[in-house]
Image: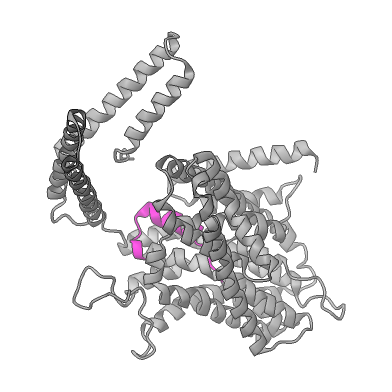
């Protein structure tokens, strides 16, 4: 393609991504499904198309998306739900791949068990981006978000390792159970080690990371560094990126400045927005590539292979979740329960998933670009020079599984969550935040008492009293808010006084901003000064609750 064509495609992609976000906000339809359909429609039109390059996806698109998701995750929450996360991200991936492989070996002419397992490994790992975007918008409970997020962070490493083993068997290298287990263990341990090395290796750069621009540059480079380091020693680059992101997200609040944190968060939100949009457009755009090679297969073969793949993807997941919940106590996986959970403490996470939670987790298994990137890595021929068994059919089945789950499940996930009443207790979350705010203010007041006890002059006295007055005002406001929250359940209650205070504070900020603009327009304030003062007002406004939609 010419440079102008590439630039026009990039601009068109951004326009479609923005339009899909706007349409999704107003219709409730998931932007991921809208973008996939848009890419599919474009793929059917005449003109230049983009063929998915698996190396670009795995080395350029995947690391920043995984790293950003890890930064937004909770290491503590994942550790508390580790058994459930491992069950979904390791065991369920293996079971799904074996189910697809067995179905292909038994029912699809010309397919081998190894080729079927390769397809199963590609379609086994869900891509939680679409489900999480919808779940957060409809207020999915934090535990569900943690499980979906934790599974999506770790399952890619399992799937890609299994794919490598299956492809080796299908191309003629043979299959050894012990060799496969050893390769998986080495890839996992090595990936964790590489991620930890990167996470702790950038710690000496903490002084640079206090500068927002330097910190953003380091942050954007970190996932690629972790991935390349792991791949260079032939271990899991995906796992290295995830581990690095989780550890850095957990430790960075101790030494990252507030300005750096605000800017880095904004940068990664933009990266997510654009890369996720491009990924979903690419998925739909692959339709011509996957349909082109189906001419040599009988219609019945295509139907059976499609039914085996989609059926395994849709049915194995809920069956696995149900079985792990109803297994004997000795084998039961305490889904989501941390080691500190007590049976008689209603505040702790329940040991078992309810039927509604199983339904939500089952329907959150949307597949994405990893499945397509993985299946596109299949070689054209085996070691003997023969064509890879049913390669074109495997490509089509993977694409169909992605399309069905991403569009079908993605479009119905929000109505399902609402119908089941799976909403987070917003009032309980608000109470927790208010109690934490009170604890922080009380710690500040205690520090003021310590400062006052030290040697100081009258200027320090005045400063201490001024700050003490501000903190006491905030503490009184938090106490009043906590009384309003009281025994509230579900939605956050709003008192008339609180709403009036918010209206007044927003009106004052708007008036200040208008006056600053008037000064700029009159030539009394340079644009540089305007931007500095606007930033101060923006921070004040961001501290207020979001306006109701």
For this orientation, the residue located farthest to the front is: 455
**Residue at x 71%, y 38% (from the top left corner):** 7
Q: In this orientation, which residue lies closer to the viewer: 324 or 533?
A: 533
**Residue at x 77%, y 38% (from the top left corner):** 3
**Residue at x 49%, y 49% (from the top left corner):** 206
Q: In this orientation, which residue lies closer to the viewer: 53 or 21?
A: 53
Residue 462 at least partly seen: yes
Give residue 62's position: percent from left, percent from top. Answer: 61, 58
Relative horizontal placement of residue 383, taking residue 423 as reference (left or right): right
Q: Quadrant of the N terminus?
A: top right
Give residue 204's position: percent from left, percent from top. Answer: 52, 53
Relative horizontal placement of residue 453, taking residue 516 as reference (left or right): left
Residue 419, relative to residue 548: is it above or below? Answer: below
Residue 366 at least partly seen: no
Name which quarter of the figure residue 85 lies in.
bottom left
Total marks shown come to: 0
Relative horizontal placement of residue 461, taking residue 286 as reference (left or right): left
Magenta residue span: 125-143
Based on the picture, tell me whether residue 140 belongs to the magenta stretch.
yes
Give residue 275's position: percent from left, percent from top. Answer: 59, 49
Based on the picture, tell me whether residue 187 belongs to the magenta stretch.
no
Give residue 401's position: percent from left, percent from top. Answer: 59, 67
Residue 458, relative to residue 543: is it above or below? Answer: above
Q: Quadrant of the C terminus?
A: top left
Relative horizontal placement of residue 142, taking residue 283 as reference (left or right): left
Q: Which colouring convention does the figure follow?
A: one colour
**Residue at x 56%, y 51% (from the top left corner):** 276
Label the magenta part by its dominant secondary structure: helix
Residue 134, relative to residue 391: is it above or below? Answer: above
């Amino acid at each position: 393609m010419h440079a102008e064509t590439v630039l026009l495609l990039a601009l068109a992609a951004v326009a479609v991504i923005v339009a899909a976000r706007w349409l999704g906000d107003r219709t409730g339809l998931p932007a991921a499904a809208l973008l996939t359909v848009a890419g599919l429609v474009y793929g059917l039109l005449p003109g230049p198309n983009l063929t998915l390059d698996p190396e670009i996806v795995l080395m350029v698109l995947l690391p920043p998306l995984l790293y950003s998701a890890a930064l937004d995750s909770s290491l503590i929450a994942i550790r508390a739900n580790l058994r459930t996360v491992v069950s979904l991200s390791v065991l369920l991936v293996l079971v799904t791949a074996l189910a697809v492989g067995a179905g292909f070996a038994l029912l699809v002419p010309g397919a081998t068990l190894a080729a079927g397992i390769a397809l199963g490994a590609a379609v086994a790992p869900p891509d939680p981006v679409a489900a999480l975007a919808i779940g957060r918008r409809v207020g999915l409970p934090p535990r569900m978000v943690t499980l979906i997020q934790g599974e999506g962070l770790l399952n890619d490493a399992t799937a890609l390792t299994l794919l490598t083993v299956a492809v080796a068997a299908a191309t003629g290298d043979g299959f050894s159970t012990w060799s496969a287990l050893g390769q998986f263990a080495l890839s996992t341990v090595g990936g964790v080690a590489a991620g930890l090395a990167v996470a702790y290796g950038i710690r000496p750069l903490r002084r640079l990371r206090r500068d927002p621009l330097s910190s953003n540059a380091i942050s954007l480079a970190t996932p690629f560094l972790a991935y390349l380091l792991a791949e260079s020693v032939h271990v899991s680059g995906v796992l290295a990126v995830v581990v690095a992101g989780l550890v850095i997200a957990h430790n960075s609040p101790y030494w990252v400045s507030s300005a750096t944190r605000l800017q880095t968060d904004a940068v990664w939100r933009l990266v997510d927005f654009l890369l996720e949009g491009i990924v979903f457009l690419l998925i739909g755009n692959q339709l011509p590539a996957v349909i082109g090679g189906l001419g040599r297969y009988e219609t019945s073969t295509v139907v059976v292979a499609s039914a085996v793949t989609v059926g395994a993807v849709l049915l194995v997941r809920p069956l696995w979740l149900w079985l792990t919940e109803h297994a004997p106590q000795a084998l039961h996986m305490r889904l989501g329960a941390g080691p500190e959970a007590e049976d008689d403490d209603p505040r702790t996470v329940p040991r078992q998933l309810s039927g509604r939670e199983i339904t939500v987790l089952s329907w959150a298994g949307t597949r994405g670009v990893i499945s397509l990137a993985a299946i596109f890595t299949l070689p054209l021929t085996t070691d003997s020079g023969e064509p890879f068994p049913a390669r074109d059919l495997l490509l089509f089945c993977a694409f169909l599984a992605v399309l069905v789950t991403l569009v079908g499940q993605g479009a119905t996930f929000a109505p399902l969550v609402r119908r089941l009443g799976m909403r987070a207790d917003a009032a309980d979350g608000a109470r927790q935040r208010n109690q934490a705010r009170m604890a922080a203010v009380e710690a500040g007041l205690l520090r003021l008492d310590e400062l006052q006890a030290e040697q100081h002059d009258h200027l320090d006295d005045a400063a201490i009293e001024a700050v003490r007055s501000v903190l006491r005002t905030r503490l009184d406001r938090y106490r009043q808010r906590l009384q309003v929250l009281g025994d509230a359940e579900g939605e956050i209650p709003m008192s008339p006084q609180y709403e009036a205070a918010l209206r007044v504070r927003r009106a004052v900020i708007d008036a200040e901003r208008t006056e600053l603009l008037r000064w700029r327009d009159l030539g009394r304030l340079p644009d540089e000064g305007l931007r500095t003062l606007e930033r101060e007002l923006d921070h004040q406004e961001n501290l207020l609750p979001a306006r109701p939609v």
